[in-house]
Image (tube, helix red, strand yellow):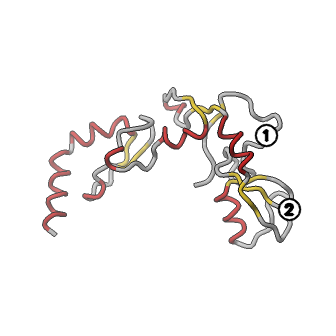
Amino acid sequence: MAGFDCDFAEDVTKGVQAKCPICLLVLREPYQATCCGKSFCKECIERVKSSDKPCPNCKEKEFNSFRNKGLEQSLYDFEVYCSQKSKGCEWRGELRELEKHLNSEPAADKSLEGCPFTVIKCPLSHTGCEVKLPRKDMKGHINNDLVGHLLKQAVLVQT
């Protein structure tokens, strides 16, 4: 997963690198390149390094990277809006809490917890249900297709 797709509740552009130069999203697990000091999302910079490409910032052919814990701690203290704000979510909190709020890949027993606008798989997907809906609509789906889910579960039990 690349960076966080969210907006800051306050201006953090002064003196703090907040965005990854590769994915252009808010840094997730910032890693600093040893060649130029620029920070990138862990996943983004690992993808570059595994393909033997040069540093995306300074074009140095050989470089290492390390977790930038100082930047991560200060960045994760900033308040952000939910990435689903445009769909109506009013949540605002520290960046470190965003993943928990979104709860994008919940365990079945936690599927109805989190942002009501996050699209999730049906908690009964293990039965073969392939429906993906915003969390706020999932309870209705489960209730409306209860018989279908039970039949799918029965088939699984028989095999």
Q: For mark 2, what is the residue?
A: 35
Q: Amino acid at mark 2?
A: Cys
In this picture, is 53 found above or below 97?
A: below
In this picture, is 122 found above or below 9?
A: below
Q: For the point 36% across and 44% down, which residue is it?
A: 110
Q: In which quarter of the view is residue 64 placed?
A: bottom right
What secondary structure is marked by label 2? Answer: loop
In this picture, is 126 found above or below 63?
A: above
Q: Nearer the viewer, residue 133 or 30?
A: 30
Q: Quadrant where the C terminus lies?
A: bottom left
Q: Nearer the viewer, residue 108 or 66?
A: 66
- Would you call the spot at circle 1 few (<14 residues within 10 Å), some (14-19), or many (20 or more)? few
Q: Quadrant where the N terminus lies?
A: bottom right
Identify the mark nearer the N-term, 1 or 2. Answer: 1
In the image, residue 2 lies at what x, y percent? 62, 53
Q: Disc 1 to disc 2, how far (Cα)?
A: 19 Å
Q: Amino acid at mark 1?
A: Val
Q: For mark 1, what is the residue?
A: 16
What secondary structure is marked by label 1? Answer: loop
Q: What numbered label is drawn on residue 85?
A: none
Q: In which quarter of the view is residue 34 placed?
A: bottom right
In the image, residue 13 lies at what x, y percent? 78, 35
